[in-house]
Image (cartoon, grey):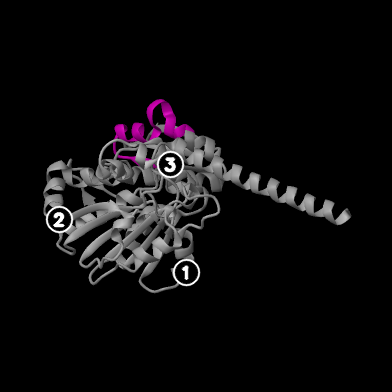
Amino acid sequence: MRKTLVFDAADMTAAVFGACDEYADAVRDAFGVSLRNERGADGKDGLTIEGDADAVEKAEAVFKYLKVLLMRGESLSLQTVTYAISLARDGEFDALESFGNDVLAITMRGKPIKPKTMGQKKYIAAMKRNTVVFGIGPAGTGKTFLAVAMATEALRKHEVSRIILTRPAVEAGERLGFLPGDLQSKIDPYLRPLYDALFEMLGPENYNHYLEKGMIEIAPLAYMRGRTLDDSYIILDEAQNTSPEQMKMFLTRLGSNAKAVITGDPSQTDLPAGTKSGLTIATEILKDIDDIAVHTFTERDVVRHRLVQQIILAYEKYGREHAHAQKKKENGAKTARKDG
């Protein structure tokens, strides 16, 4: 089968092929198609795709998606191409065609914040529709940053009067008492990712202004006890490190006109061995309640360096193999006891 995709300019054709044909090679390797850059009788550049019918259809869907991104003025990366390939490989053509140009917010540097994956798009939609949203998934999927972007937009539009960001101060290999400074200095390292996201969205001056006015509060989870949080956008980050009691305490702080986003990665808990995560239990208990949404990201939604996806997959594979080997060992021990 053979198909030709026409481009309006030579630089657009070069862009979809990538530097040293990097993007084209990724599509060739994924679908086993041949690609040629040809100029038609009308003088326009064209990309000719040849190969198995199914493979050609999928490759064409990838390049159509990349063309749309370029027409919007967006830049391409190998990560973008890899994501498009994964959607096409799974036959998710509707996802490629419907991927919108939604701008969630604009940073202080003028950078538009947009969903980069369908998982992120669904996460944003869940935050818009629901009062409480759980964002579950691996590192690098934008769980915290997108929640902070939603919160700052709500503050700018006067939908809430303050933003409250919190994390459990779990000691992940280091002791708070060994860190220098007063209590604020000791807890700052735990809250640094939240500061970074706010600085990106608001800029240092606006951040300090909101902080002085009490419109932004960043504090350890323990500081939430006994409070009622009205007219607030509340984000609980690293929630896999909460105990069931802490999670229940946090969720029952919600007051009138309040929204809460709880983010975490159950695979990266720093809780003591044998301690159940409040995040895991809460999502199981609350998943069927109206106005509460549980959104799960996968490694395909990772928007950091492409190696992060491979690292996550490698750890998942190791975990499965280790669990299988452990189960096999336990079954062997049971059989030996029976025979004995």
Which residue shows up at 33% across the image and 44% down it?
190
Q: Nearer the viewer, residue 231 or 214?
A: 214
Left or right for 89, reference 191: right
Type of the residue with mark 2: Gly
The residue that mark 2 highlights is: 214
x, y (%) of residue 271? 47, 50
- Confirm or deny contact between disc 3 and disc 1 (CB under 8 A): no
User: How many marks overall?
Assistant: 3
Q: Amino acid at mark 1?
A: Ile
Residue 167 x, y percent position in the rendering? 34, 52
Rendered residue at 31%/41% (across/down): 189
Pick whichever of labels 2 and 3 is earlier in the sequence: 3
- Tell me the magenta residue range: 5-25
Q: Secondary structure at mark 3?
A: strand
Residue 93 part of the magenta-drawn span: no
Q: State which quarter of the image contains the N terminus.
A: top right
Q: From what the image shows, is residue 93 above or below residue 191?
A: below
- Residue 262: image location, x then y, percent: 36, 58
Residue at position x 14%, y 52% from top?
A: 210
Nearer to the camera, 340 or 157: 340
Q: Tags 1 and 2 in contact by the CB under 8 Å rule?
A: no
Instruction: Identify the residue position indicated by label 3 in the image.
Output: 4
Q: Is residue 48 left or right of residue 204?
A: right
Q: CA distance from mark 1 to mark 2?
A: 33 Å
Mark 1 sits on what residue? Answer: 285
Q: Is residue 101 visible?
A: no
- Foreground mark, 3 or 1, reads 1
Classify 24 as above or below 291: above
Dot 1: element:
helix
Viewer-closest of 219 and 68 = 219
* Mark 1 crowd level (few <14, some 14–19, many ≥20, 10 Å Cα): few
Q: Secondary structure at mark 2?
A: loop
